[in-house]
Amino acid sequence: MTDLEFDKEQQIVNEIKKYISDNLPLSQLSDEALEEKVEEITGRYLQGHYIPIERRISIVEQIYSSIRGFGLLDSIIKDDTITEVMINGSDNIFIEQNGRLHKLDKQFESQRGLEDVIQRIVGLAGREVNQANPICDTRLPDGSRVNVVLPPIALCGPTVTIRKFSKEPMTVEKLIRYGSITKEIADNLELLVKAKYNIFISGGTGSGKTTFLNALSNYIPKDERVITIEDSAELQIVGVENLVRLETRNANTSGTGQITIRDLIKSSLRMRPERIVVGEVRGGEALDMLQAMNTGHDGSLSTGHANSTEDMLSRLETMVLQGAEGLPLEAIRQQIASAVDVIIHLSRLRDKSRKTMEITEVVGYENGRILLNPLYTFEEDDRSTAQKVSGRLNRTKNPMKNTMKLQLAGITKEI
């Protein structure tokens, strides 16, 4: 018996794949039947070779996933310690693990192989990506977010970025455990959500906005009608029976059929929502969202990219202008001030930890400025170093001013 070297193993994998695609009616076989056939044929090919059982299983998985799964990606996706996958062409794969980036010592067998996997991922969600339409946002069956850019736009070859999705919904208890917020703050946020304050979560890339929104959305009373609107559906709201999940759609190859966040917000207003949860506001849809918040659709939750609370307000102004050029800045600021009640700002700090930096209420508009009243701010303590951030979210001396919704909800507790 001979030990099987890696190159020889890959050669056998390719031979078995070719044999299977040439000789088996793949379209007629169920997943289970195909897996059994792969095991049987692999067993025949490996006779006479000494090979540990783990490697034998690995070969079967490689062959099966290259036919029905996502090939090399399957093993990466199954690894729960990996949070992000970046594929820059067939032979450059990077992963984020425990907040750090590493290059993987694996690669796709060819650019064609990578393109086949991309088509399988995109096809599962009913999307299209090709030379005429080379950019696509989609998701994996587990909800993980996927962005695809094809050549000739991507010069290094097909580029895929996958933001992995936790199998367990994020809860506020976990945020407390991770030190992002305290139990007292969580209790106060629960009151704000239940009293239907309009809450905006802001932060930079990878700061945990969607994660925080997920946790916060689970404070929504279970008997309400909730409509979620996202580019690629990844929110996990549990326990709400009257839940409608809406997802955008890209234009097809002939350039028609596009459904935007803006279309979905307008449509959701005719669906008798008690809550509208928008995964992320990026453009002109900000105007529709603010108008919804201002016309009795309280309790809306959303996120947006920004580097500070003030930056979130100016970003919102810019987004509204994308949706309604010529609208006076004063009118826009008044809209924002009366629509948004609370902004929670998150940040990814120098030690890669994610922290809640500020919880601020928006208290009005005066002399051309939106007025803010910070309720909690993150302060570093003397245990902080250049490598490690230590600190906590502290209550400021400012009393909460906008307490009307708490009173209407019958909540007497001071926040």
Image: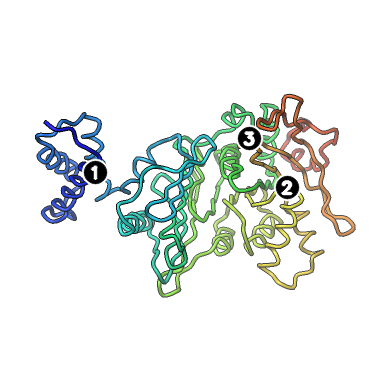
Which residue is depicted at the point 40% across and 49% down? 140
Whichever of labels 1 and 2 marks the residue nearer the N terminus, that label is: 1
Drawn side of residue 44 relative to residue 119, left or right: left
The Cα–Cα distance between marks 3 and 2, rounded to whole angstroms, is 18 Å
- Residue 351, numbered label: 3
Instruction: Give the class, few, some or many, for how many residues have Cα within 10 Å of label 3's Cα (few <14, many ≥20).
Output: few
* Residue reaching furthest to the top: 383
- Which callout, 3 or 2, points to the residue nearer the camera? 3
**Dot 1, how many residues are within 10 Å of its Cα: few (below 14), some (14-19), or many (20+)?**
few
**In this picture, is 39 found above or below 173?**
below
At 54% across and 54% down in the image, what residue appears? Answer: 229
Residue 221 position within the rendered picture, expressed as x and y whole percent measured from the top left: 59, 38
Q: Earlier in the sequence, mark 3 or mark 1?
A: 1
Q: Residue at x 73, y 40 (%)?
A: 359
Q: Quadrant of the C terminus?
A: top right
| Drawn side of residue 51 relative to residue 276, left or right | left
**Which secondary structure lies at badge 2?**
loop
Q: Quadrant of residue 381?
A: top right
Give the x, y percent position of residue 368: 86, 59
Closest to the observer, 161 or 182: 161
Q: Is residue 75 left or right of residue 183?
A: left
Q: Is 331 situated above or below 45?
A: below
Q: Which residue is mark 2?
A: 308
Mark before the other along the chain sequence, 3 or 2 = 2
Question: Label 3 sits on what residue type?
Answer: Asp
As helix, strand or loop, the secondary structure at mark 1 comes to: helix
- Relative to the observer, which residue lies in front, 312 or 117? 117
Q: CA distance from mark 1 to mark 2?
A: 51 Å
Identify the mark at residue 7; answer none if there is no mark: 1
